[in-house]
Image (cartoon, helix red, strand yellow):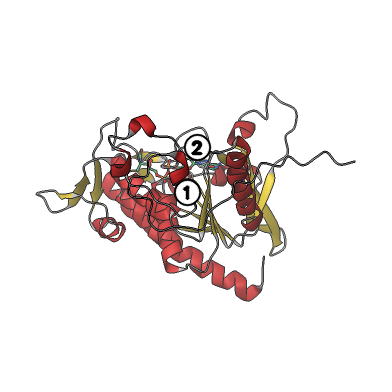
Amino acid sequence: MSPPAATSPTFSVAAPVTKLPSKATTANDYAVKGAQASIADMEGNWDSFRFAPIRESQVSRAMTRRYFEDLDAHAESDIVIVGAGSCGLSTAYVLANRRPDLRITIIEAGVAPGGGAWLGGQLFSAMVMRKPADAFLREVGVPYEEDDTGNFVVVKHAALFTSTLLSKVLAMPNVKLFNATCVEDLITRPSNGQDVRIAGVVTNWTLVTMHHDDQSCMDPNTINAPVIISTTGHDGPMGAFSVKRLVSMQRIEKLGGMRGLDMNTAEDAIVKNTREIVPGLIVGGMELSEVDGANRMGPTFGAMVLSGVKAAEEALRVFETRKKENAV
Ligand code: 48N
């Protein structure tokens, strides 16, 4: 006999109202679908203030129902972006705007997306972007100051850039961010004989991924997609994940290894060389410096956003090719 399904009392919900009684201050005043109290209704009325009623299971169901609906839908994605740093988020912003018809999935190992873009450099707040990356800031709507040289702009706090970009990306209906989730392998398909092309990602909760060595096997989950964009950076516990995995699966021979800091050389190279490294896998941002042996640029972020713009362009080219080949 199946266990009794937990049933929560169903609250009777009155017809949606557009306007609350003039001074809505009791819980019942709010607990009508569509009712919208204002802050002014509450100010000065704290003695009688109460939240609308709830049952804990309703919170659980509100979260889990949506999460697993998303997981089910995104099991087949059009494009997966690995890493929600400045490059990955810029890629997602461009892709989702240019192709609202595509199902875009972002996998971010950290609880907090944003990667290294919450601070400018050495924990200083301001973020520098060399022109013409200011064009991206204007498109996203991030305020900045022009430097007197005319060669670069400064966002007063890196978190202003990252939070603005993140809010725009998360608000897009065709984008889903799975954070605290790690890509711990790549899905492959045979391609041209002994080669393989990338056809999806293998994921696990990041906390599980971090403990494969000290726990028994904990199998992963999977997401199929014809195009993967890897922007896992060069830093942190999982930096350059995908290109390191290509070496360990002997799909590429070795990594070039990131070179010393040279802003002028580094930023042009990262943007120009953002590309499909192996069929189905595009690499951008600082992960690219590891595979190409490119210089690092240090605390300037223009290459990250414009590498994202180029990665999005490359991804759409690859996506259309795969669609023609019907290669999934
Ligand atoms: O910010 P990062 O590290 O990477 P990018 O390429 O978006 O931006 C790089 C930039 O922050 C710099 O390093 C600057 C310009 N400095 C350069 C220099 O010379 O020092 O973001 C990568 C994201 C992080 O949030 C990671 O948590 C995440 O990728 N990540 C992963 N997410 C899921 N699965 C993985 N396997 C994984 N590995 C990393």
Task: Respond yes or no on whether mark 2 lies under 8 Å from ligand 1.
Answer: yes
- Residue 231 tag number: 1
Residue 219 appears at what percent x and percent y?
73, 39
The residue most toward the left is 148
Do the CB atoms of the residues marked 2 and 1 lie less than 8 Å apart?
Answer: no
- Give the quadrant of the N terminus: top right
Q: Earlier in the sequence, mark 2 or mark 1?
A: 2
Quadrant of ligand 1 in image: top left
Measuring 24% from the left and 56% from the top, which residue is drawn there? 134
Please give the count of numbered marks on the rendered protein: 2
Measuring 37% from the left and 47% from the top, which residue is drawn there? 37
* Residue 199 in the figure: left or right of residue 81: right
Residue 242 appears at what percent x and percent y?
56, 46
Say if residue 198 shows up in the picture.
no
Q: Quadrant of residue 203?
A: top right
Kind of residue sitting beneath label 2? Gly
**251 or 224: which is nearer to us?**
224
* Residue 76 in the figure: left or right of residue 316: right
**216 or 142: which is nearer to us?**
142
SS category of the residue bearing label 2: loop
Residue 117 appears at what percent x and percent y?
35, 41
**140 or 257: which is nearer to us?**
140
Residue 224 appears at what percent x and percent y?
65, 57
- Give the quadrant of the C terminus: bottom right
Kind of residue sitting beneath label 1? Thr
Measuring 22% from the left and 55% from the top, which residue is drawn there? 131
Say if residue 223 shows up in the picture.
yes
Task: Respond yes or no on whether mark 1 lies under 8 Å from ligand 1.
Answer: yes
| Residue named by callout 2 | 110
How far is the residue under mark 2 from the one under mark 1?
14 Å
